[in-house]
Amino acid sequence: MSGMNMGRDVVLNEDAMETAPMRTVVVASADAGLRQRLRASLTGLRWQVREAAGGAEAMAQLEDSRSEALLVDSWLPDLEVGEFATVIRMLYPAMELLRVDGGADGGARSPRRHELLHSLREAQNASLNDTSVWATAPEAVPVAMMGAGLRAPMRVSSPMRRDFDPEESRTKDDEVRLDSARQALSVLMGRPEVARPAMQKEVMLPEMVGGSEPMRELARLIRLVAPRSTTVLIEGETGTGKEVVARALHRLSERAGKPFAVLNCAAIPEALLEAELFGHTRGAFTGAVQSRTGRIEAAHGGTLFLDEIGEMPMALQSKMLRFLECGELQRVGDNETMRVDVRVIAATHQPLEKLASSVGMERTFRLDLYHRLAVFPVEVPSLRDRMEDLSMLAEHFLEQMGQEMPRKKLTAEAMAKLHEHSWPGNVRELMHVLERGAILAGDRMEIGVDEIRLRRATRG
């Protein structure tokens, strides 16, 4: 009899699981791989998962759905996480907010919190190389940072019911507080018309070293365009770090878990560039003993970075334009076309618009290709335009070199000499000057003015 009852209980429990209502959770992270792992785990536990690559997208998801929980990564590309979490707790006091490390941030406690924590542990175990750390825990962020109009977030004493409607329980005081929270959120999302001085600080990207105005603007542009598949043209002098910008764009995009292929158009002979870019079949030309996948095809689903795009031959530019317009490519020696999903990011130190607008023999770049590449142009500032970042950059490079040799410092005289230079080679030149200085210093732990040997900008 007891066995029959136990079997009946199992059947009832299984039926209850099948009919249990799905709960909604929003997962906010710039890491597409992390979002995918959390989605797989939570979907198996009958959660409806909505993904967001940044804070602004997370807000849109929360407004469109009645979510029981929000999982937030330690870093967001568009918003400062601590301030974002504080506003979220005020706007949605009945929703649980969890960090990727499993820490809670006040508010309600989900009845199925153990499932959320289980999924977080599974996602972290699946990516042992993930070393992200919360630099600023939301509970440590003072509410005063949000402006004078904000107070402490509302608390609720009971878990959120599935039929809970925040609109039904709000008082006039709550509405005032929520209006302030929405206003603060609009500042975080980049709406200057309601900006408060305490919240206008831009959060720099990990790849970007320096806090100057040009670098803050560069970081802002990267955060804006990264989540899209828009073609980006990175312009800037040699040595400014254009590839660093390209990698940041890829890391913050939905394609972060896919390949990042790099092709330097100036480093490959013109006769081989087409085959290197589009691939070739066996016997397509002398020496083609086997078929080969091109860089475009290898980057399927990810990002293709074309460095020094201005060096691409005119004959190949027409094929590149065709690919950008229709997403199809044809291997050298093949009659069949294939469709490839690739985001293209190009970089150049040349004035492409001027070269494309020239007439006659001077025209070396197609104007239509330029317009297709420069959908969203981004200019990387030269070092002389952000000299206030020089000290920070020098410390950054010395710290990097300290991983292979004893960490050295610059004397005040050496630093002054660095500030007097015009830096035609930009950040790359600074890195080489410091490396040379560290070698010349020998066993001494300081790099003096004599070890700072600078090349002249021009030679007679």
Image (cartoon, rainbow, N blue to C red):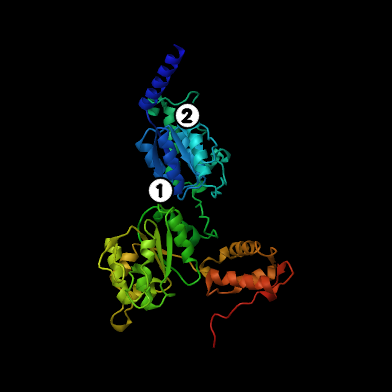
Q: Which residue is mark 2?
A: 110
Residue 404: x %, y % from top left: 65, 64
Tag shown at residue 193: 1
In the rendered structure, the answer to whether residue 435 lies left or right of residue 81 reads right
**C-beta proximity under 8 Å, tags 2 and 1:** no
Which residue is located at x 58 percent, y 74 percent?
Answer: 421
Q: Mark 2 and mark 1: span between their CA atoms?
A: 36 Å
In the orientation shown, which residue stands out farthest toward the top?
1
Secondary-structure class at tag 1: helix
* Vertical position of residue 408 compared to residue 102: above or below: below
Q: Residues within 10 Å of mark 1 (few under 14, many from 20)?
A: few
Specify which label sits upstream in the sequence, 2 or 1. Answer: 2
Q: Residues within 10 Å of mark 2 (few under 14, many from 20)?
A: some
In the orientation shown, which residue stands out farthest toward the bottom?
460
Tag shown at residue 312: none
What amino acid type should be assigned to the residue bearing mark 1?
A: Glu
Q: Is residue 150 visible?
A: no
Q: Residue 141: which quarter of the image?
A: top right
Closest to the observer: 25 or 5? 5
